[in-house]
Image (cartoon, helix red, strand yellow):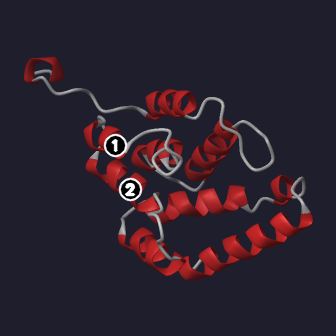
Amino acid sequence: MTTADTGASALLTPAEAEAIARNAHAGQTDKAGRPYAEHLAAVAEGVRARGGDADQITAAWLHDAIEDDALTREWLARAALTPRTRAIVDALTKRPGEGPQDYARRILATPGALLVKQADLAHNADPGRLAVLPEETRRRLTEKYARMRALLGL
């Protein structure tokens, strides 16, 4: 029996998640004014390089989509993703008013999420990426990323 026979849809591949993420984040830029998709690509590559699997690579492409309002929670709930990928994306989505300790606890409690967050933090804290930012912003972000790395035991 095929997925067409059951009415179920095939799971999104990492390449399909990439296309969805690039489309969802089209026109968005990072703090340095670069296309946001560059960050997503770097995180996905970081996950792959760290031995991440297809669920984690897919989650890497989607990790900021809900938080940045590029996609909705409803989309995430209905998307053709494995429960693990969905859980990783959800774990990496910060909640309004949520403190760093609660955020870190959720990541640590979600199988597969720590590797994706590690790749995210590595790209966010890249000295070349930070170098183009104003000194005050660079210092603030460097401290923020170091605190999160410590909370996560990285």
Q: Nearer the viewer, residue 17 or 27?
A: 27
Report the side of 48 relative to 6 (left or right).
Answer: right
Using a 10 Å C-alpha cutoff, classify the residue at mark 2 as few (fewer than 14 neighbours), some (14 to 19) or many (20 or more): many
Where's residue 99, x and y in %? 50, 77
Where's residue 150, x and y in %? 61, 81
Where's residue 16, x and y in %? 45, 28
Report the side of 71 relative to 121 (left or right).
Answer: left
Chain-order first, disc 2 or disc 1: 1
**Residue positioned most to the front:** 97
Quadrant of the snapshot with the N terminus: top left
Using a 10 Å C-alpha cutoff, classify the residue at mark 1 as few (fewer than 14 neighbours), some (14 to 19) or many (20 or more): some
Q: Which residue is mark 2?
A: 90
Dots 2, 1 in contact, CB < 8 A: yes
Identity, as a three-letter code, of the amino acid under mark 2:
Asp
Q: Residue at x 86, y 56 (%)?
A: 133
Q: Residue at x 36, y 66 (%)?
A: 110
Task: Work out whether 18 lies above or below 46.
Answer: above
Q: Residue at x 48, y 70 (%)?
A: 97
Identity, as a three-letter code, of the amino acid under mark 1:
Leu
Rounded to the nearest angstrom, the CA distance separating label 2 from label 1 is 8 Å
In terms of secondary structure, where does tag 1 sit? helix
Q: Which residue is mark 1?
A: 76
